[in-house]
Image (spheres, rainbow, N blue to C red):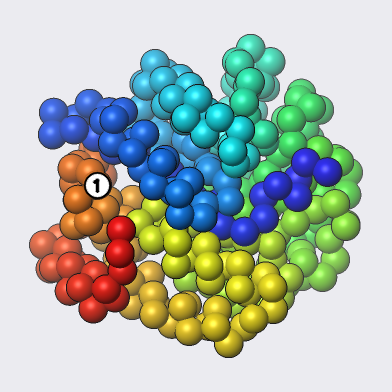
Amino acid sequence: MIHRQFRGMGVALITPFKEDGSVDYAALIRLVDYLLQNGADFLCVLGTTAETPTLTTEEKNEIKRLVIERVNGRVPILLGCGGNNTQAIIDSLKQDDFTGVDAILSVVPYYNKPSQEGIYQHYKAIATATDLPIVLYNVPGRTGVNMTAETTLRIARDFPNVVAIKEASGNITQMDDIIKNKPDNFDVISGDDGITFPLITLGAVGVISVIGNAFPREFSRMTRLALQGDYANALTIHHRFTELFNLLFVDGNPAGVKAMLNAMGFIENRLRLPLVPTRITTYEKMRQILQTLNIKY
């Protein structure tokens, strides 16, 4: 069954930019190779971490094409395909080319602040417009509205092609409620690196990770160990990264992970407005932690 592909550590790919602000496609390909060589189980393309709202249609199409071509079927591809105009998403699903895409990730509509019934109807319209597997994405800190466990479970039961949820509400009780009451053909995926370990112990099947851009080998190992029930060794890795989890998000995402990748020599430390790089103090703390972790890359 196709949705079981989204187990383990998926990586929410960043979009590298050159100093002139253009997309650094060569750096993107190098990053994809690095992730594939170091244990990434699937890739999430054109999500929040990719700074997708600031990309042109041409850039998005080229990123999608390049990543799919480079991956060449070695791991599943989860493509961001969400928004706050339901009809526009339906049009995209009907008109765009999804060759090489294994599923779509569709965020709860932001800014409009729909009711729970509105959220349900939004996903109903999307689910009936495509045969592609759909992963829901609940991130109230960004959207302004929380999709409740009740609404998530209602969608999961009513639409068989809705196969999982990326849960980033930060509400462990809500996530546990979904895991406890979900249908068998529906999975919960962590949308927050810092709580991936405890969430897997409750029954989540993995993570769509930001820190995985920089440390795929270590974070995929933690995820795998936790999924195998080796909680002691998984916890040791989790605790090695707790300070870094906080630093990565203190100045916003993907500013933190881009600073880290810059310190590691992978990319220029460039973002597109309205996002800006991390503060110098944050960057220096990251460099110090990077030295103490002594991770080979």
Dot 1 alpha-carbon crowd within 10 angstroms: few under 14, some 14 to 19, many 20 or more? some
Q: Nearer the viewer, residue 123 or 285?
A: 285
In-image side of 273 versus 82 (left or right):
left
Mark 1 = which residue?
266
Q: Nearer the viewer, residue 63 or 21?
A: 63
Relative height, residue 105 to residue 237 (above, below): above
Q: Position of residue 27 (x, y in %)?
A: 28, 36
Q: Position of residue 140 (x, y in %)?
A: 54, 56
Residue 126: image quadrant is top right
- Quarter holding the N terminus is top right
In-image side of 251 versus 285 (left or right):
right
What's the residue at 75%, 45% (across, down)?
3
Q: Residue furthest bottom?
A: 232
In-image side of 136 versus 47 (left or right):
right
Is residue 276 among the parts visible in the rendering? no
- Quarter holding the C terminus is bottom left
Q: Amino acid at mark 1?
A: Phe
Q: Position of residue 254 (x, y in %)?
A: 33, 50
| Number of marks present in the image shown | 1
Relative height, residue 213 to residue 88 (above, below): below
Residue 263: image quadrant is bottom left
What's the residue at 60%, 15% (across, down)?
96
In-image side of 222 versus 53 (left or right):
right
What's the residue at 76%, 23% (across, down)?
129
Is residue 264 among the parts visible in the rendering? yes
Q: Position of residue 120 (x, y in %)?
A: 76, 43
Residue 150: image quadrant is bottom right
- Circle 1: element type: loop
Q: Residue furthest top?
A: 95
Relative height, residue 114 to residue 249 (above, below): above
Relative height, residue 219 to residue 25 (above, below): below
